[in-house]
Amino acid sequence: MLTTLKNIIVSHWRGDYSLGIAYWVIGVGLTVAVSFLVALTNSFVSTFAVSSSLFGSILVVLCSLIIPLTIWQLVGIWRSAKYHTSQGGRPLWANVVRVMVVLAAIRAVLDFTEIGIPQFQEGVDLMANGDTVGSFELRVLNEGKELELIGFIPFGTTKSIREVVRQYPAIEVIHLNSKGGRVTEAVQLYDYIQQQQFDTYVASECSSACTLAFMGGRNRYLSKRGILGFHSASLPSSTDNLAQLNDEFKRIYRRHGVSEQFIRQAIGIDGASMWYPGHLELLASRVIDEVVASDRFATSNAIQELQKTWQADHLQQAPDNALVNYWQTVVDNLNYLNFIDSQQCIQYLHPEWFGQPLALEKVLPTNLYGMHRQAIERVIEETDLQPDYQVKLGSIRVLAQNMLDTIARDYPNYPDVIAEPERYRDQPKLLCSALITLYETALRQETISQQAALLRYLAHTD
């Protein structure tokens, strides 16, 4: 058997086989067979949840075999084409095959550069260090009816979840709070969630590959404080063909009726960036079934980045009391920043002038930042965003003009500062003081409804 195999290898390498055998059997046929073997290997890895070190070994072995195999195939076919005319064959076919060999060699080099080298490096890294995607934590909640995943989605995540479900068979809901991980593992988790008919729920953030697992839910719920993040699968640590990964995203999204416009937008985001669509868009695109209050399910341990959940619509649609409470904390923050550093006060009000928002958690005292965060949480929780919401300004313009007249009596130059803030960028103390006075005056109106109406008007951008 070994002797026969050796003879085949040597004979093809020297170009001893006919051009038909070399091209169709050893070239095309063997390539199809290897592709089938790789597909079987991927199926094995997904089905049996192999360890990261074993998966790395498989990657290294496949890469190490495919490279010399490709060289052997192409060299043998080229030599067979060279001898084809001397054996009575047509020069046309020999020339056509030479062209195909050159094209195949170029494609092989490109594939090796873009896919082979990263896969080989990833395999070596997995063998040496294990899965470096990150770890995860599993928590059983609500008397064994809910299961929470916090962290990443490395190899073996689904296997661990299966083991927990076997111990707690009453689980009905899976919380997914993850910034992503291995696409193949996320697809496996998606299949398992579908098989078990679990509901999926996101309390904080589910991004990248995590969204694939999320789509497996029988019902898909998103907390009012939660976000979903999307981008193309063009991550540098990916060990799969990027086009195939994006096809996997599309296949799963389409299976659940997600709009084509949404899919194009999601896949079009560069892998180094992230797109966080608003709740209304997620509902309209059929990515989620319902936005729910945070107390709908058991309390999550995941950290919530409220600034990613916050939308301009909250400042228009929030209930009066929650909105006024929010602006009270904003004024407290502004007064503190204006006293400490007026430039930071302006960055808080106009982050677009500085290229980034002010990191409030770093510059505010703990008590002020805590109250502000609670006010944001209250606005988010109490606001039911409506897609057809219409801003009604009406007589508020008159109330706003009366407010500006009142300010002008005490501070004659403030209305000009408020109307054209950019002219006063080099006078941060004056600018911040004028805007603080504006909001404080709005908050001193006689009724909560008047205060809220003025604050909505001031936040209105159209």
Image (tube, rainbow, N blue to C red):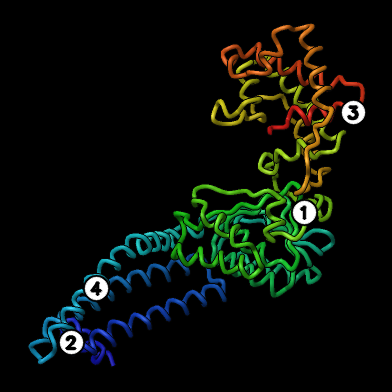
Contact, CB < 8 Å: mark 1 with mark 4?
no
**CA gap, disc 2 and disc 3:** 91 Å
Q: Secondary structure at mark 2?
A: helix
Residue 85 visible in image: yes
Give the residue number, with chain letter if any, for mark 1. 291
| Label 3 crowd (10 A; few <14 / some 14-19 / many >=20) | some
**CA gap, disc 2 and disc 4:** 14 Å
In-image side of 226 versus 452 (left or right): left
| Label 2 crowd (10 A; few <14 / some 14-19 / many >=20) | few
Contact, CB < 8 Å: mark 3 with mark 1?
no
Point out which mark residue 448 bears.
3
Q: Is residue 413 above or below residue 213?
A: above
Q: Earlier in the sequence, mark 4 or mark 3?
A: 4
How many marks the image carries: the answer is 4
Quarter holding the N terminus is bottom left
Residue 360 in the image: x percent, y percent?
66, 29
Residue 139 sits in which quadrant?
bottom right
**CA gap, disc 3 and disc 1:** 28 Å
Q: Is residue 354 above or below residue 71?
A: above
Q: Earlier in the sequence, mark 1 or mark 4?
A: 4
Amino acid at dot 2: Ser
Q: Earlier in the sequence, mark 3 or mark 1?
A: 1
**CA gap, disc 1 and disc 4:** 55 Å
Q: Residue at x 76, y 51 (%)?
A: 223
Q: Earlier in the sequence, mark 2 or mark 4?
A: 2
Point out which mark residue 109 bears.
none
Give the residue number, with chain letter if any, for mark 4. 71
Q: Secondary structure at mark 4?
A: helix
Quarter holding the C terminus is top right
Residue 55 in the image: x percent, y percent?
47, 68
In-image side of 286 versus 355 (left or right): right
